[in-house]
Image (cartoon, rainbow, N blue to C red):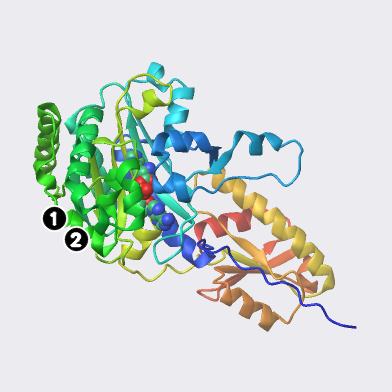
Amino acid sequence: MKETQAKKFAVPRGTADILPQEVAVWEKVETTARAILDLYGYREIRTPIFEETELFARSMGQTSDVVQKQMLSLQTQHKGDAEDIAKAGFSLRPEGTAAIVRSYIENSFEKKEGFSKLFYIGPMFRGERPQKGRLRQFHQIGVEAMGPGTASPLVDAEVITLSMQLLKALGINDAKLRVNTLGSVEDKQNFSKYLREQLKPHLKELCEDCQNRFERNVFRILDCKNKGCKAVVEKIHLGSAPLSTESHQYFTEVKTALTDLGIKFEHTPSLVRGLDYYTHTVFEISSDALGSQDALGAGGRYNNLVTQLGGPQVDAIGFALGIERILLAMPKEESPKPQGLDAYIIPLDEPSLKRAFRYLEELRRSVYEFKVKDNIPKNFSIDMGYGLGSLKSQMRAANDRGARFVVILGENELEKEKVTLKDMSTGVQEEKDLNDIGAITVKLAEGSI
Ligand code: HAM
């Protein structure tokens, strides 16, 4: 008979499995982040991983690269209960801000609290061409401060400081911070007019993409990685772009507050960010440890987005850090050894196997009850091999799993209604009553005989 080869599936391009041995470092990033976010008064919010495509288009901007080229939209295979998904047009979230604003408005946060400080940690999706540090599924730690009272340069300075403190807590001390201001909506319009005037004589020197951006989203030309475009941008005088006195004053106060807090930064007039919703302060954090995708995180103020999406007139500012890029930039530590078992159950013959399997479950239940009752922070782990083998081979298995104790059940033990409890680090062993599960539970919790 001809053998058909089964198709081997691979993880989708631009995504990655986070394997058990890698989870510890992800947990470390998340736990550290949560500690710092708590410190600054942020509370977690969890929104769905897909939203109406229009929400993203209306917030990030129809002409932004993300909306134009990178949205991953949902389709249903069959006409059925989920047909509305295709009809309404949903996409996987490419970022968190739009969804948080949607939720803020939908849940009337502004009526319930004056000043909302929200954070999120989770996967985002963009249909990009994958390369090092640029994925199709990546993870962000993001914060959004929203509501009346957030339009203060002190809030800008605090949000920026928080992003730098988060990185510092993760051992990233060499992150570079660049800041700029786009000014108010009116300033932005003047700025784009000014940019067009400056760029017009050089239009032919720009790449095709930038020639298209000239009318639709002139700011994006400043970010273009193309050599020719970079050379043109260097020629124009960004420092003399028009900015209202109020916007100038606001930005000066942000910079002063940052200096007061001891945060080093560089004012980069060409930093404009690729998303439409920004007004006033924008910032980006980069690291030399990364390759061409060197942004660890970025953010800025968006004072008009909430209103634009049908909400009240409240100001807002936020940022997001990319976890995969943080992991690339973090000092490499030896990954912590996986936690060993607290106990490994060893049956020596067929009748003991069945009893051992039941014993395993009884012990797990008892230990868990003990943990909850005594508020023990440590998690316990108890296991067995589910089959029979020589005592020697099962002891080896227990050793390989880092077992603290073994519990041996054999013919002798069953007859006497006993089990043998052996401490693997001292070699000391004791007989215990088979039915006195509490006695073994206490030993496991104490960690020694
Ligand atoms: P963003 O600059 O698009 O901003 O993304 C923020 C960070 O997410 C980037 O600096 C990078 O570390 C990470 N990132 C973005 N795309 C990818 C990718 N394809 N692969 C790996 N990492 C990536 C935002 O998302 C805004 N929502 C930030 C914000 C919050 N502004 C105000 N509030």
Whole-percent x, y for residue 195 in the image:
20, 43
Q: Is residue 38 left or right of residue 244?
A: right
Any part of residue 28 in sight: no
Q: Amino acid at mark 2?
A: Ala
Quadrant into which the C terminus falls: bottom right
| Secondary structure at numbered mark 2 | helix
Q: Residue furthest top?
A: 111
Write the residue at 31% across / 65% down. 292
Q: Which is more toward the observer, 50 or 209?
A: 209
Q: Which residue is mark 1?
A: 235
Label tally: 2
The percent coordinates of residue 165 (x first, y second) are: 24, 48
Question: In which quadrant is the N terminus drawn?
Answer: bottom right
Mark 1 touches mark 2? (CB < 8 Å): yes
Q: Is residue 145 left or right of residue 237?
A: right
The residue closer to the viewer here, 126 or 207, is 207
What numbered label is drawn on residue 231?
2
Residue 18 rendering spot, x and y as whole percentages: 51, 62
Residue at the image point whose x is 43% and y is 44% from the top: 95
